[in-house]
Amino acid sequence: MSYLLIVDDDEDFATAVATVLRSGGHDVRIESELSAAIRTMTERRPDLVVLDVMFPENSTGGFEIAREMRWNHDTLKDVPILMLTAVNTRFPLGFSSKDIDEDWLPVTDFLEKPVDLDVLAERVAAILKNRRSAPASVPRHAP
Amino acid sequence: MLYRKTVRAFHRSPSSRNCREARAPVTWQVLLVRDHPLVFQVTCPLEGRAAIPPMEGTSLHSDGMRISTDSIPRFSYELPLPVADQSAPLPAAEGVAAVLQEALLIGNLLWFARLRWMAISVLAVFGVAGLIVHDLFPSLGLRPPIGWPFLIAAILLLANLVFLGHAHRIARNPSPRAATWNLWTQIVVDLLALTMVVHFLGSLETVTPFLYLAHIVLACIFFSRRQSLVVVAIASGFYVACVGLEHWQIVSAAGIYLDPGLRQGMASHPAYLWLTVWSALGIYFVVWFLASHLSGLVREQEAELAQANRLLTIAQQEKTRHMLRTTHELKAPFAAIAANAQLLLGGHCGILPDAATEVVRRIAIRCRRLAVEIQEMLQLANLQSADTPPPSVSLDLAETAQWAIARVGAVAQERRVTVDEQLASACVVAVEDHLKMLLTNLISNAIVYSAEGGIVRVRCDAMPPGGPVVTIEDEGIGIPQEKLPRIFDEYYRTEEAIRHNKDSTGLGLAIVRHVAVNHGIRVCVDSAPGRGTRFTLRFPFTG
């Protein structure tokens, strides 16, 4: 069982995701406030963070949280991040794993909303599996 | 999977072999060279309503009757491409007229140089005539031109070479200030040369002083009123100086006429002389007044049109931005709805009654359709709003087509449509995602609007005359002739298309149109109701 943190201000969506992930046997917590996300992570280090991009007060808050985790917190820099978003600001046709970048998009993998929950569950499982097989490094691309 | 790969004829030229290695971004302008188009041909049934496979030699007409396909005419339609990019943003309103004028100046520097070659040629021919048929001139009462046409032609030739060199440097590195300097120098040199011609042909007894009018009118067209007045003043000054120098015998009077009486008559009394001069100057100013006034009116209208176009462009961009924002705003709550419907269907909330499951299933289906529509709306809006397009790369057309075919493989399998591919390698320069989108949309349409059990043929021939050709062909129903010009419109769906495929968003071919226009790809649709539709894509040559 892994501890997963969902950082998303849309509680309806986050609850649905949490339900599916819990049914997979994981311990899941939802954090809907961007300002509290890092604190929640430092209180208990998650095995994986499911992170939204757009928040009511900060339209790129998800990117900033990801960079904050990677650059400023030794305990969080290796935590895998699965980014979920409806936004697309850089590339015309949507993000994809090829756009993941240490500086701009420092996440492990990316899924665009609306997301198939089965696909999401598979992706989470794959990231956690890679994580267990290579604990010292951040998995870059889920299959 | 119902793929049938019949022939794999990969013709790899040295350039196409290096396609994968040459994936560095290439400048956008390269795409717009149309002299040597690559050809990409796609044939597909775009629409149709019957799931009945047509019998051999027959097909289903739009009214449902089986008729002989031999008698069905095919109709063609080519998507019009803009002749030039008019989407470039213009500066603020007050700068529009100035920008137009600067563009006019830079654009016409080379044209002025070409006009000067003509003047040089005329002078040279005149000079040669003076040498070869020297004796003919006196018999016509004319003084043979000795040397001066060559002298003036040489001055103009030297000046033209300098101007041309400078103009080419300006063309490579546009500079309005340098262009203006070049043009004013050209004007002064031309007026000086013209004054010499006036002197040698006769400043009083011939009509050559009216040649100044050509310069004055050109100045009125290309310059502001004040600047063109300066040209009139320079021309007038040169002419008065010419006549004055001759009158006070600082320069000996020349003239083409042998009879000295003609000039002496004009110059015999100061009143005759100055009346002639002032008449000429008066005409210069009248012509300047009329030409500059009319030119100013035309320029104002041009500026107004440019301004209106600029405002329209801004409004379109704002509309697109608003649409993008709205779509994104809709996407988040929609994702929550879709996720919760999946929860119910997945049994995460317990077992639902059959009737409730059916309702949730319908919700989930509509969610999937809406997801596709939102994605296409975003793609289209992004294509419309892209001020700076993503970088273009060298792509293998065959590989990209194969990627697109694989992408729509599930749809083909679901509809029992066979995709028959015959693809040869062909290198093109394009935005990878955009080209994939274009091909995916066309091949997907070919499959979706095929009859069940039909065949979609995708061809890419790398070595036909003029460039590679790719064709996709099937046994679909096709598009009525009168509907062909509208199929690329946003949200346009024919009744036949809706009957055949309720999931159609009407955005697929609008996306194709935008990608084609952005890449300079010529799209030709060739369709016959009851027999299918062929899309021919002619790519610009990439070297």
Image (tube, rainbow, N blue to C red):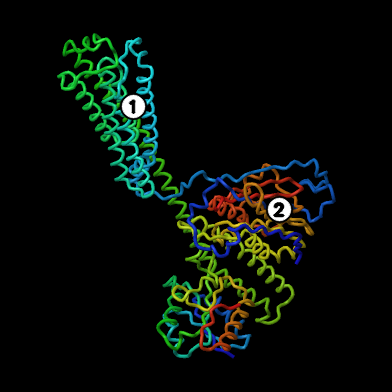
Could you say which disc has been placed on residue B44 in the image?
2
Please provide percent x and percent y for residue B445. Answer: 68, 56
Q: Residue at x 63, y 49 (%)?
A: B487
The chain ID associated with circle 2 is B
Element marked by disc 1: helix
Q: Nearer the viewer, mark 2 or mark 1?
A: 1
In this picture, residue A48 sits left or right of residue B398: left
User: Does B296 appear above or below B439?
Assistant: above
Q: Residues within 10 Å of mark 1 (few under 14, many from 20)?
A: few
Report helix, strand or loop for mark 2.
strand
Q: Quadrant of residue B165?
A: top left
Q: Quadrant of the N terminus of chain B?
A: bottom right
Q: Amino acid at mark 2?
A: Cys
Estimate the x, y position of residue B190 in percent, counting from the top left.
Answer: 30, 31
Q: Is residue B377 left or right of residue B418?
A: left
Q: Which residue is mark 1?
A: B214
User: Please, which chain is the residue tagged with disc 1 on?
Assistant: B
Q: Is there a contact, CB below 8 Å, between mark 2 and mark 1? A: no
Instruction: Indicate the position of residue B152 as horizontal and vertical percent values.
Output: 30, 28
Q: How many marks?
A: 2
Dot placed on the residue nearer the N-terminal end, 2 or 1 = 2
Front residue of A68/B354: it is: A68
Name which residue lies at 71% across and 66% down: B410
User: Of residues B426 and B501, which is closer to you in this image?
Assistant: B426
Where is B532 relative to B378, above or below? above
Residue B377 in view in this figure: no
Estimate the spatial distance between the alpha carbons at disc 2 and disc 1, rounded to whole Å: 59 Å
Is A46 placed above or below B188 here?
below
Closer-to-camera residue (B213/B220)? B213
Same-subunit check for callouts 2 and 1 = yes
